[in-house]
Image (cartoon, grey):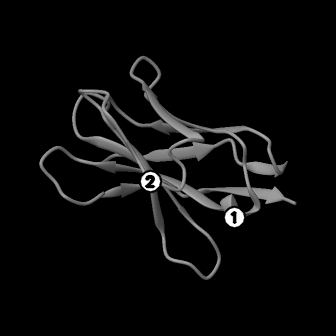
Amino acid sequence: QVQLQESGGGLVQVGASLTLSCVASGQIFYNGYMGWFRQAPGKEREFLANIGCASGRTTYADSVKDRFTISRNRATNTLSLQMNFLKPEDTAVYYCARRQAGETSYQYWGQGTQVTVSP
C-alpha cells in the first residue's frame, strides 16, 4: 500500500514562491508516474503536472507550465512542486498522487495541503 504525505502549504502574498513536498512510503520512484493536482472551493480537481519516475519526463498544465516545476528525489522518496509568481487563483488544496506503471488513472492520493495566496 502506497502512502503519500504532502507538506509545505501556507498563506503567501501575490508574487511569492512556495515549494510543496510529498513524501512517499516505499521505493516507488522507479516506475509509474507521480503527479500534482489541486482543487479550489467549488471547482473540480485540476491536473497540474506529472513526472515519469523512471524517465524523469515532465508534463504540465498550460495554466502553470511557466511558473511551476515538478521534481522527484529517489534518495528521499520525495516529490516536489516549486511554485513561483503565485496568484490568487492558485489558492486551492494541493494533492500529490501516484499512478502505477501500466495504469491510466491515479490510484493513490495524499490528504492534501492548503495553499492560500492573498491579493
Is 42 placed above or below 7 here? below
Residue 89's mark? 1
Left or right position of 96 against 93: left
For numbered disc 2, what is the local secondary structure? loop
At label 1, which amino acid type do we have? Glu
1 or 2: tag closer to the N-terminus: 2
Give the residue pinned by disc 2: 61
Q: In which quarter of the view is residue 31 placed?
A: top left
3D distance between C-alphas at marks 1 and 2: 14 Å
Classify mark 2: residues with Cα within 10 Å, few (<14), some (14-19) or many (20+): some
Is 38 placed above or below 72 here? below
Q: Residue at x 25, y 60 (%)?
A: 105
Q: Nearer the viewer, residue 54 or 107?
A: 54
Q: What residue occupies the far bottom of the structure in this picture?
A: 42
Q: Position of residue 4 (x, y in %)?
A: 46, 46
Q: Position of residue 87 (x, y in %)?
A: 74, 55
For numbered disc 1, what is the local secondary structure? helix
Q: In which quarter of the view is residue 88 placed?
A: bottom right
Left or right position of 117 against 30: right
Q: Nearer the viewer, residue 100 or 60?
A: 60
At label 2, which amino acid type do we have? Ala
